[in-house]
Image (spheres, rainbow, N blue to C red):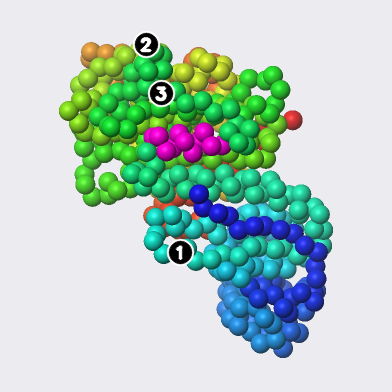
Amino acid sequence: MTDMPQLSAAALDLDAIATFTGRVVVFVGEDGKLDQAARRVNRLTKGALERCVAGDAFSKLKPGDSVSLAYPTGVAATGVQVIRLERRPSVAQARKAGGAIGKGLGKGGALVLAGTLNHAAEVALGAALRAYRYSEMRSEEAPEQGDITCMVSKPDDLTAALSGIEALAGGVYFTRDLVNKPANVLTTQTFADLLEANAKLGLKVEVLEEPDLEKLGMNLLLGVGVGSETPTKVVVMEWNGGGDEPPLALIGKGVVFDTGGISLKPGAGMEDMTMDMGGAGVVSGVMQALAARKAKANVVGLVGLVENMPDGRAQRPGDVVTSMKGDTVEVINTDAEGRLVLADVMWYAADRFKPVGMIDLATLTGAIIVALGHENAGVFSNDDAFCAAFLKAAEAEDEGAWRMPLGEGYKKLLKSDIADVKNIGGRWGGSVTAAEFLHRFVPEDMPWIHLDIAGVAKPLGETTLAPKGATGWGVLALDRMIRDTYEG
């Protein structure tokens, strides 16, 4: 898995600036005033920093943006990165500034002269997240990245914060690695193996194999995978850090590759369907982060791992399948498979664990991308307070999320002529009818959120805190929700 740069805190040492051989980072506010460390950098570079701050390039920067002085005289550093940031930035601005550091991180590392800057830990988090590089599939060696040292006025406080920061960033890295892996590398078996390895962190990990799923009656899930040579599995991850309270349940769609099955997708763009296990990736990353930071909460993560392939045995459009719940489902389109995966796993989670609430995540519909683009995940819920807690956490973590409707009118579109329900509701409101299908498998009075992350799991280009590829969206928001709502 991808290694993360080491993060550390140190007391401000002005004499160490001249001899640091990587990249030196300073922060300057809109007024252009230099703090103690920046003044030392300015003297060492014979006024170059001051001239930079007085120039047009710096004046046009937005908070968190940067300019660089390459190989300046007077210091051993390969560059001085000048970031426009006030002493009391917002969390989002601090993380953006960190993103600028991480994006340019080289083998010499970075010496971040944060001094008395508020939210130095958030700068470190942003730097770690943006420093991510997925290079596992490349034959050449990955470019080296050094470590990130933050010099601050209170290094002990920052050191204490960094352990939690590293746990969070590690969870995001894990999610990104899973989503970025090609399907011939991340099979259902290798996925399960990687999750079992997290038992070393204190997670209780259980793998349900096909005979187990057959006994449970998970025919919707099993039906998706019958055309594949790779076995269908459910992995259950339990973190018990909160006493005797019932857990929060997180459920993820883990379709490691989606051809659409007999309802075959167009060939153009099908290679992107390696990311159709994005919901399971987020659940896995959250569970790793909770275990790594020893969260004082009870959370269970369940992922349905399956591959959707066309084959002589594959499920056909028009088939009727009986769910674990007992409802019969007419499969109109085998490419609407994610909801079949989730339905059985959700019902199993509710029946076995009696959770305080359920949150499912899935790269479920193209319709949500049409509606919200790549800026927001779609949020569907049957409980206003539960939903509000998540939306508050997502806003605090700057992870875009927008509440979408549910309703009887949408539910009626799923009426089948021959079964209890059909798996699609037609062209209109596709993300909503998908959510209403899942709603059917939520026990009465169970708080529930469905997160359609098709647009945010792997957008078209880079973001502030991620290079092009998987973002790990949702790890930070769900961890925040758990901390704020379920940890005393």
Q: Amino acid at mark 1?
A: Glu
Observer-nearest of 307 and 144: 144
In the rendered image of this protein, does residue 156 appear above or below residue 363?
below
What secondary structure is marked by label 2? loop
Q: Which residues are magenta?
A: 188-198
Which one is earlier in the sequence, the residue at label 3 or at label 2?
3
Q: Position of residue 1 (x, y in %)?
A: 50, 49
Residue at numbered disc 1? 141
Could you tell me which residue is drawn at 35 percent across and 24 percent down?
221
Could you tell me which residue is drawn at 67 percent across and 40 percent down?
293
Secondary structure, magenta segment, majority class: helix
Q: CA distance from mark 3 to mark 2?
A: 20 Å
In the rendered image of this protein, does residue 44 appear above or below residue 164?
below
| Labels 3 & 2 near each other (Cβ < 8 A) | no
Residue at numbered disc 3? 209
Q: Which part of the image, by quadrant, shows the C terminus?
A: top right
Q: CA distance from mark 2 to mark 1?
A: 52 Å
